[in-house]
Image (spheres, rainbow, N blue to C red):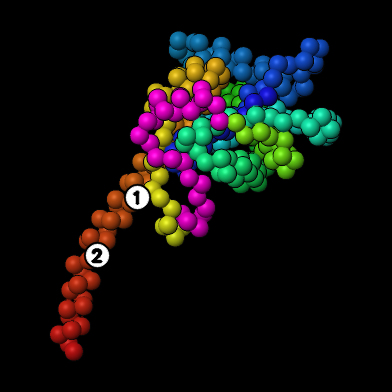
């Protein structure tokens, strides 16, 4: 098992777990069998050229695209359990955390991992319980509303379990930081002029002392990331994450511009009020 930590912007990073090969003779759990069947059905519907199946898939994919990339990436971690945890501690197992040392500072890597594991854990739990409660009420309406719920339900469930597993790895220091020539060269090629990633706290963002956020990975870089790192699954993860952070940054820029326009419009009125007060005095 390897863990990739890839900077998306100067503040945000994508974490992804590449699992090892499945042991022969292992029986998949019920939740995995159900969601695998749902994924196969979804894929078949997606292949339809038109009709209600195609419409359902189009709507569902659009909704799933908006699930935060942090949750998608956390579900890449295999679910942990007490037996597995005991074995990993006893064996002194260490997992490589691959990151670009020419873009990210080594001391920031554990902080980023901890933030991704812990900040969203309560949100994952709340969504998981909400999905559990809501799913029975969708049954009377037939398969159409149920199947889009299954991928969402599974994503939330696996995100929660992924958070737990990552948290366990951090608490027991079962990781080994590793910046490889391969990943450093990748970021040199993709973002030669981008500023470095900097871990910023919430207080720095609130009080305005944090440096402005800038993109590091941009549109259409996902295929090269997957190809160079030899992890095909990373392509979709990076594409989704870049789309989301780009959208977030554009919305923030629009809000900032609107705020500046409001200040400019307000300024003449403030000056006029001050002048009136001075004349009265």
Q: Secondary structure at mark 2?
A: helix
Kindly identify which residue carries mark 1. 255
Q: Residue at x 28, y 56 (%)?
A: 260
Q: CA distance from mark 2 to mark 1?
A: 16 Å
Between 42 and 79, the one lying in front of the other is 79
**Left or right of 30 on screen, residue 105:** left
Position of the C terminus, as image quadrant, is: bottom left
Q: Give the quarter of the image for residue 222.
A: top left
Work out which residue is located at the far bottom of the displayed protein and give it: 281
Kindly identify which residue carries mark 2. 266
Please indicate, yes or no, whether residue 13 appears anywhere in the rendered image: yes
Is the residue 255 above or below the residue 247 in the image? below
**Left or right of 7 on screen, residue 214:** left
Q: Residue at x 44, y 60 (%)?
A: 207
Q: Residue at x 65, y 29 (%)?
A: 96
The reply to whether the magenta stretch includes residue 186 is yes
**Left or right of 258 on screen, residue 171:** right
Is the residue 44 above or below the residue 213 in the image? above
Q: Are marks 2 and 1 in contact (CB under 8 Å)?
A: no
**Left or right of 203 on screen, residue 189:** left
Between 40 and 205, the one lying in front of the other is 205
Q: Secondary structure at mark 1?
A: helix
User: Residue 52: x and y, percent?
Assistant: 50, 17
Which region of the structure is painted magenta?
179-205
């Amino acid at each position: 098992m390897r863990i990739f930590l890839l900077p998306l912007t100067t503040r945000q990073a994508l974490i992804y777990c590449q699992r090892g090969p499945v042991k022969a003779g292992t029986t998949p759990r019920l939740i995995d069998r159900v969601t695998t069947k749902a994924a196969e059905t979804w894929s078949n519907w997606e292949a339809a050229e038109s009709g209600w199946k195609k419409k359902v898939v189009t709507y569902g994919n659009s909704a799933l695209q908006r699930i935060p990339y942090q949750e998608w990436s956390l579900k890449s971690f295999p679910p942990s359990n007490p037996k597995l945890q005991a074995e990993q501690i006893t064996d002194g197992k260490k997992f490589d955390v691959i990151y670009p040392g020419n873009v990210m500072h080594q001391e920031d890597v554990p902080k980023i991992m901890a933030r991704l594991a812990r900040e969203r854990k309560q949100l994952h739990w709340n969504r998981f319980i909400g999905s559990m409660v809501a799913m029975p009420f969708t049954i009377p309406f037939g398969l159409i509303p149920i199947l889009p719920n299954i991928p969402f339900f599974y994503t939330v469930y696996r995100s929660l379990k992924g958070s737990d597993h990552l948290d366990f790895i951090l608490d027991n220091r079962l990781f080994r930081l590793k910046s490889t020539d391969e990943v450093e060269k990748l970021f040199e090629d993709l973002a030669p002029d981008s500023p470095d990633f900097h871990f910023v706290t919430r207080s720095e963002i609130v009080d305005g002392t944090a440096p402005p956020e800038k993109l590091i990975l941009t549109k259409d870089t996902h295929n090269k990331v997957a190809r160079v790192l030899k992890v095909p699954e990373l392509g979709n993860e990076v594409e989704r994450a870049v789309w989301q952070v780009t959208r977030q940054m554009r919305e923030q820029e629009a809000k900032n511009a609107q705020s500046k326009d409001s200040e400019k419009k307000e300024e003449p009125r403030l000056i006029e009020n001050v002048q009136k007060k001075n004349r009265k005095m």
